[in-house]
């Protein structure tokens, strides 16, 4: 990608569309200018120009898993994600011991691919009661020093660390690490008061809201209520049509507004593959249709891409502009990579997704080489 000008309906950083032209030079956005829509010609009139999608929480795809893949397989995962519009990707770990996780971090750090923007550490600092598909044999107390050792193995790529705030030592770890990584509350039995203390200590995100946590109750609002009630806290949301009911998706966007929802895929090996038997975190997962479960029926990640989730959320009535923000700018901010990606602005990486306006079919994906 040397130099090119692309015209269509540009998705501007404030979340609206209007005619525009994006100039790309040497893998970066060199300039963006507004155009009257009557200046657009032919297919430009029906082209939506978006930032590339940003998936900050995905475990696997096309038969490969973040925790088992070698460098070549990780590269293939990133290539597949690019083909479905995801130009910024955080491979996400499962719960294992430190030695295994250090090896995973070293392999990811060795990958040279423009789509790799960091690592999401989902385990092992989680609750046994709400472990979901995480392997409880490897769960452990929150440990800031361990995170720093893993960060060294990852060459600084760890962006997000999940933690159950009620665990012994969790508040101390949150306070200790909040300036270094994003702390996301996850797989937890935390009540409202505990969650609020964790946010005050420096946690700023909730991992897959509604899943693997206490339900939202009008007298016991729990983590979900604390998230709704704490300004600036972002919530990940899996909009695959399985993890969260469509009415809850709509109401979450209404409750949190266009700034705070971070859509994720939470995808596992079966994404981009046929039905069958797969693995996640060393456990067998059975996939039928788009539903992935353990033998006991526990949902074990999704078999959908972020692009699939984006289309689903729009199909159930969430305003498309809010969905696009939740798949681009918001996750980039959540992973602290917004200076590079997530919006169409001069100086940022030339990561663009061009869609057909009516069908949202992908016309083209561009990414910095």
Image (cartoon, rainbow, N blue to C red):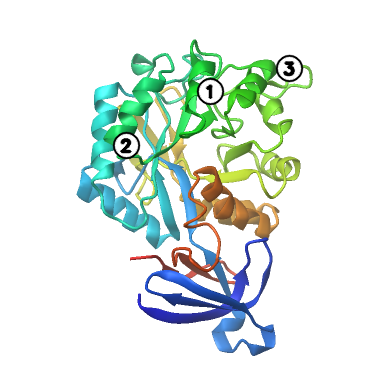
Front: mark 2 or 3: 3
Q: CA distance from mark 3 to mark 1?
A: 25 Å
Q: Earlier in the sequence, mark 2 or mark 1?
A: 1
Q: Earlier in the sequence, mark 2 or mark 3?
A: 3
- The extreme top residue here reads 168
**In this view, 328 is above or below 150:** below
Q: Compare residues 61 and 21 and report the one nearer the observer.
A: 21
**What residue is shown at x 67% (from left), y 69% (from top)?**
17
Give the residue pinned by disc 3. Answer: 220
Give the residue pinned by disc 2. Answer: 278
Residue 175: which numbered mark, if any? 1
Dot 2: element: strand
Residue 138, position in %: x, y? 34, 17
The quadrant the C terminus occupies is: bottom left
Q: CA distance from mark 2 to mark 3?
A: 37 Å
Given contact means CB atoms under 8 Å apart, are the residues at marks 2 and 1 in contact? no
């Amino acid at each position: 990608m040397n130099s090119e000008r692309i015209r269509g309906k540009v998705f501007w950083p404030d979340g609206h569309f209007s005619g525009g032209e994006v100039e790309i030079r040497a893998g970066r956005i060199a300039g963006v200018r507004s155009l009257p829509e009557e200046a657009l010609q032919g297919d430009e009139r029906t082209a939506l120009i978006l930032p590339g999608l940003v998936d900050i929480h995905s475990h696997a795809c096309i038969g490969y898993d973040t925790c088992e893949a070698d460098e070549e397989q990780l590269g293939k995962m990133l290539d597949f994600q690019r083909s479905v519009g995801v130009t910024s990707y955080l491979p996400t770990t499962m719960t294992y011991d430190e030695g295994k996780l250090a090896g995973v971090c070293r392999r990811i750090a060795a990958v040279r691919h423009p789509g790799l923007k960091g690592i999401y550490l989902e385990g092992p600092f989680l609750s046994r009661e709400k472990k979901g598909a995480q392997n409880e044999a490897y769960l452990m107390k929150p440990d800031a020093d361990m995170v720093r050792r893993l960060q060294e193995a990852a060459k600084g790529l760890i962006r997000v660390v999940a933690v159950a705030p009620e665990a012994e030592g969790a508040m101390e770890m949150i306070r200790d690490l909040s300036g270094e990584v994003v702390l996301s509350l996850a797989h937890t039995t935390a009540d409202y008061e505990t969650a609020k203390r964790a946010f005050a200590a420096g946690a700023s995100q909730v991992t897959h809201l509604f899943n693997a946590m206490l339900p939202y109750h009008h007298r016991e609002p729990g983590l979900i209520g604390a998230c709704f009630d704490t300004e600036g806290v972002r919530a990940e949301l899996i909009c695959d049509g399985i993890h969260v009911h469509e009415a809850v998706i709509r109401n979450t966007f209404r409750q949190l507004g266009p700034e705070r929802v971070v859509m994720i895929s939470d995808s596992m090996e079966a994404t981009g593959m046929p039905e069958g038997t797969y693995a996640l975190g060393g456990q067998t997962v059975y996939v039928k249709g788009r539903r992935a479960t353990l033998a006991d029926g526990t949902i074990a990640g999704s078999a959908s891409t972020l692009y699939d989730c984006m289309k689903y959320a729009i199909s159930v009535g969430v305003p498309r502009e809010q969905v696009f923000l939740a798949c681009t700018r918001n996750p980039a901010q959540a992973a602290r990579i917004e200076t590079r990606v997530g919006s169409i602005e001069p100086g940022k990486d030339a990561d663009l997704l061009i869609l057909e306006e009516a069908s949202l079919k992908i016309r083209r994906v561009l990414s910095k080489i």
